[in-house]
Amino acid sequence: MIASAEAVGLAELGDTSSASAALVVANGVAMEVAVAHADHLDGDVTLAMHKALLGSTEPESSGKWRTVQNWIGVSISSPHEAIFVPSHPDRVPMAINDLERFLVRDDLPTLVQAAIAHAQFETIHPFTDGNGRTGRALVHSLLRAEELTRQVTVPLSVGLLADIRSYFDALTAYRDGNPEPIVERLANATFAAINNGRTLVDELHTVRATWDDVITARRGATAWRLADMLLSQPVVDSPLLQRQLGVTAPAALGAIEQFVETDLLVKVSGRQRYRRYCAPRVLEALDTVADRADPCVSG
């Protein structure tokens, strides 16, 4: 089940009622780690990504290479008839070191290199859980390192996982010695994500433009800064505004009240000073992105 944009926003503020939303937030933190360390991709960075992903749910295994045999298949008790069985856990560190050397090569087109690196990572399958999400974060880190992305992360899961069967077939082909399908898959996913992202930007600009005729505060007031903030943080509370905008509690509450009066914000949870609010039109645009993509982001 895909978490709604509202559920994700609440999870970012500490709400723990939605497990799927918490997973999305963890994915985002892992992506931040990946991008922050794009200039030196190595095993330690990969472990940090994994710990960001699973540190709160699987603390005993997060940020650690697997020490047991795993496999991909329908049975959790036996690798018999498994779709794929990775190498013995003792070989994981050596395989990761080899992947590190591949990541710093400069003789391949970046998308080709990213696709092969991702496929190899999934083939190593170095963790007991979270391999897919960590492997996709690794792709984003490489794209940032090669400056194909500079300010945003392109949501590659939009296309990469839209057809799970095709994705797994591409990984199988890679393991059989044919890298072309996974390279094509990642390239197509990249263009799909770019198109989806551009559409979202246009929709958010349209939403923001309509607010100019509604906000009555003087220019430079907290309300205008809140309007810009809501495009990237559509679920807010007073403490968040105080931290993000550097304003007092009365100023934050005053801006929120102005937006509530004009229906730009609506209350979604909490009481008194713990109330949380959302921007419905921004959430609608974000949920539309998910509807266009409809990816499965687990793994």
Image (cartoon, rainbow, N blue to C red):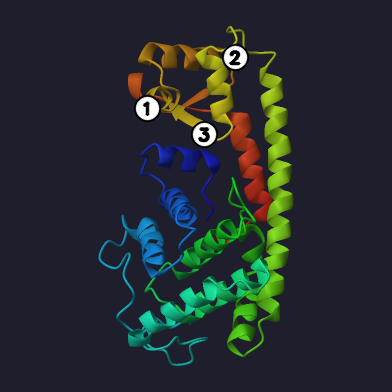
Q: Amino acid at mark 3?
A: Gln
221 with respect to 112 (left or right): left
On the question of residue 295 being in view, the answer is no
143 with respect to 78 (left or right): right
Disc 3 from disc 2: Cα separation: 18 Å
The residue beneath circle 1 is 270
The residue beneath circle 2 is 262
The earlier-in-sequence mark between 3 and 2 is 3
Dividing the picture into quadrants, the one containing residue 269 is: top left
Q: Amino acid at mark 2?
A: Thr
Disc 2 from disc 1: Cα separation: 20 Å
The residue beneath circle 3 is 233
User: Residue 222 location in percent, x, y?
Assistant: 50, 15
141 with respect to 292 (left or right): left
Residue 116 vertical placement versus 221 (above, below): below
Query: Which secondary structure, mark 3?
Result: loop
Query: Which secondary structure, mark 2?
Result: loop
Query: What residue lies at 63% left-to-right and 89% top-to-bottom?
Result: 177
Near mark 3 (Cα within 10 A), the count class, few <14, some 14-19 or many ≥20, is: some
User: Residue 105 location in percent, x, y?
Assistant: 57, 73
Disc 3 from disc 1: Cα separation: 18 Å
Near mark 2 (Cα within 10 A), the count class, few <14, some 14-19 or many ≥20, is: few
Near mark 1 (Cα within 10 A), the count class, few <14, some 14-19 or many ≥20, is: few
Choose between 57 and 245: the one closer to the eye: 245
Query: What residue lies at 62% left-to-right and 12% top-to-bottom?
Result: 215
Marks 3, 1: nearer the viewer: 3
Circle number at residue 103: none
